[in-house]
Image (spheres, grey):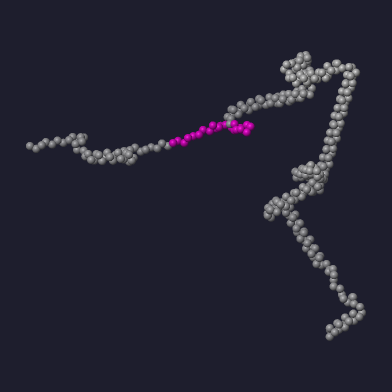
């Protein structure tokens, strides 16, 4: 009796080729490792969005304050403008108060007694109280010593002096005060005289410079070129005076002209024809051309006159210097020559 055979149901591994399954698994693993898998989903690359930078000064205006840049919004700018307009009157008030303080300090230095008396009257305070406050413990020893010295010389010492000696002292003080006034008047007179001399000298120098400009051919003495030339001439005169070699306005103008000509020659020698004409202008170039044409014509005219002038030592006729015997000999010689 033959043996019974049973067929494996579908889905079991009885009829599976193990080698084929192994090969398929190996291929699948390899494809997955190399990225060649058939069922692999396509890789998607994320596109990085560009980073957007935010301008912190967007919508603001730039202001330069004391060399530094400041960016303000319109509201901030309006607020600062309002503050500036409100503070502007206070600036004038501060300037006025500063000026008054400077005047007060100067008056306190020149005449402190008057200032103290005015303060005492305004505040309705006895002036003795103010003086005691000045000389109180807050005052320095130097102030106390100077006050005591002044009180001794002007009050205590005079109170103890003999009336005759006091009269002599007062007369001496009056004489010294008058002498000081006379010296001050003399110094003021000398200063005014020196100032008048300076003004007169400046007027004379100005007149000389104006005359020199006219001689230089400058018609408009108030033109920018004339003013510049005047300044340079004055500078040359000033330098010459301080170097103990004073010169007049004409001499200074000659020095200035020589200096300018040297500069022009050195500058013009380096220029070609086109640049030279561009530098001096077409009108001046035409003047130069006419000058050389005239010079050439004058030279040719002089040559023609020289050629047409008779010789200085013309050949003298020998017959005019012969005596009678020489003349006969001369005729005999001509006859012999003609034969």
Indicate left or right for 9 with 51 as reference: left
Tell me where the magenta segment starts and ends, as one range. 48-70
Is residue 116 visible in the rendered structure shown here?
A: yes
Total marks placed: 0
Quadrant in the rendering for residue 204: top right
Please report the residue visible at 83 percent of the width from the left and 19 percent of the height from the top: 153
Looking at the image, which is closer to me, 228 or 240? 240
Whether 234 is drawn above or below 158: the answer is below
Instruction: Give residue 183's position: percent from left, percent from top.
Output: 86, 29
Residue at x-position 90% and y-position 80%: 326
Q: Nearer the viewer, residue 56 or 22?
A: 22
As drawn, 288 above or below 206: below
x%, y% of residue 146?
Answer: 78, 20
Residue 202 drawn in magenta: no
Q: 316 or 132: nearer the eye?
A: 132
Can residue 237 be spotted in the picture? no
Name the image quarter holding the C terminus: bottom right
| Residue 133 placement (x, y as % from top left) | 74, 16
């Amino acid at each position: 009796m033959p043996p019974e055979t049973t067929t494996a149901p579908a889905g079991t591994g009885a009829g599976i080729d193990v080698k084929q399954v192994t090969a398929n698994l190996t291929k699948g693993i390899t494809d997955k490792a190399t990225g060649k898998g058939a069922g692999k989903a396509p890789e998607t690359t994320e596109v990085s969005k560009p980073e957007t930078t935010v301008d912190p000064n967007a919508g603001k205006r730039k202001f330069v304050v004391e060399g530094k840049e400041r960016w303000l919004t319109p509201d901030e700018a309006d607020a600062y403008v309002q503050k500036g307009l409100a503070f502007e009157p206070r600036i004038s008030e501060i300037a006025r108060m500063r000026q008054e303080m400077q005047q007060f300090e100067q008056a306190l230095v020149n005449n402190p007694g008057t200032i103290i008396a005015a303060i005492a009257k305004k505040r309705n305070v006895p002036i003795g109280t103010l003086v005691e406050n000045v000389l109180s413990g807050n005052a320095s020893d130097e102030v106390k010593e100077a006050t005591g010295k002044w009180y001794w010389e002007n009050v205590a010492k005079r109170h103890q002096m003999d009336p005759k000696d006091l009269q002599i002292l007062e007369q001496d003080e009056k004489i010294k005060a008058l002498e000081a006034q006379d010296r001050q008047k003399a110094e003021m007179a000398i200063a005014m005289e020196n100032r008048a001399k300076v003004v007169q000298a400046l007027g004379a120098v100005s007149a000389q410079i104006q005359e020199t400009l006219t001689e230089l051919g400058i018609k408009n003495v108030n033109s920018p070129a004339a003013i510049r030339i005047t300044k340079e001439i004055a500078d040359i005169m000033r330098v010459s005076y301080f170097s103990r070699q004073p010169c007049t306005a004409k001499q200074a103008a000659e020095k200035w002209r020589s200096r300018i000509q040297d500069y022009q020659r050195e500058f013009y020698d380096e220029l070609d024809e086109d640049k030279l004409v561009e530098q001096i202008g077409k009108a001046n170039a035409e003047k130069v051309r006419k000058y050389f044409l005239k010079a050439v014509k004058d030279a040719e005219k002089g040559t023609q006159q020289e050629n047409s002038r008779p010789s200085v030592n013309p050949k003298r006729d020998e017959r005019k210097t012969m005596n009678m015997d020489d003349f006969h000999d001369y005729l005999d010689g001509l006859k012999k020559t003609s034969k």
